[in-house]
Amino acid sequence: MKKTIVSIYNFYRDGFKNMTWGKPLWILIFLKVIILFLVLRMFFFKPVMAGKTDEQKSEYVGSQLSSPVTSKP
């Protein structure tokens, strides 16, 4: 098992070393992923329970879990 993992690692390591555009492309991919998550967090995942006490948080979660789901036509 360990030999297989090492051979897979060596395969990808050698492949990326021989690529002419490998490093810039990986930097671009990581940069895009970081920016994407930052934008998603800022605009879509607002902290709903910020500033609430533990009791208020537990009540909110309980109400969200027990409320029926309604579908819109």
Image (cartoon, helix red, strand yellow):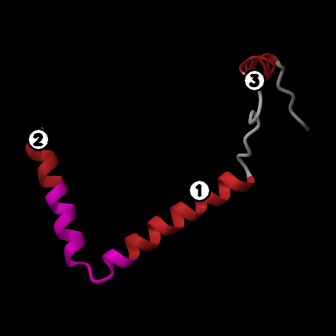
Find the distance from the CA under tag 3 to the CA under tag 2: 48 Å
Distance from disc 3 to disc 1, alpha carbons, whole Å, reads: 27 Å
Question: Tag on residue 37?
Answer: 1
Q: Of the residues under marks 2 and 1, which one precedes in the sequence?
A: 2
Which quarter of the rendering shows the N terminus?
top left
Instruction: Name the residue rendered at 20%, 77% in the picture.
Output: 18
- Labels 2 & 1 near each other (Cβ < 8 A): no
**Residue at 12% from the left image edge and 53% from the top image edge:** 7
Report, in whole angstroms, how far the alpha carbon at label 2 lies from the one at label 1: 34 Å
Which residue corresponds to mark 3?
A: 53
Task: Judge depth for marks 3 and 1 and give the one in front.
Answer: 3
Give above or below for 62 relative to 24: above
Note whether 56 is above or below 51 in the view shown: above
Tell me which label, 3 or 1, sits earlier in the chain.
Answer: 1
Q: Nearer the viewer, mark 3 or mark 2?
A: 3
x, y percentage for residue 34? Answer: 53, 61
Secondary element at tag 1 = helix
Which amino acid type is marked by label 2? Lys
Three-letter amino acid code at disc 1? Phe
Which quadrant would residue 13 be assigned to in this image? bottom left
The x, y position of residue 53, in whole percent, is: 75, 23
Say if the magenta span includes residue 46. no
Which of labels 2 and 1 is toward the front? 1
Residue 63 percent location from the top left of the image:
81, 19
| Left or right for 14, reference 22 | left
User: Residue 2 got which mark?
Assistant: 2
Q: Foreground: 58 or 29? A: 58
Q: Which residues are magenta?
A: 9-24
Local secondary structure at mark 3: loop
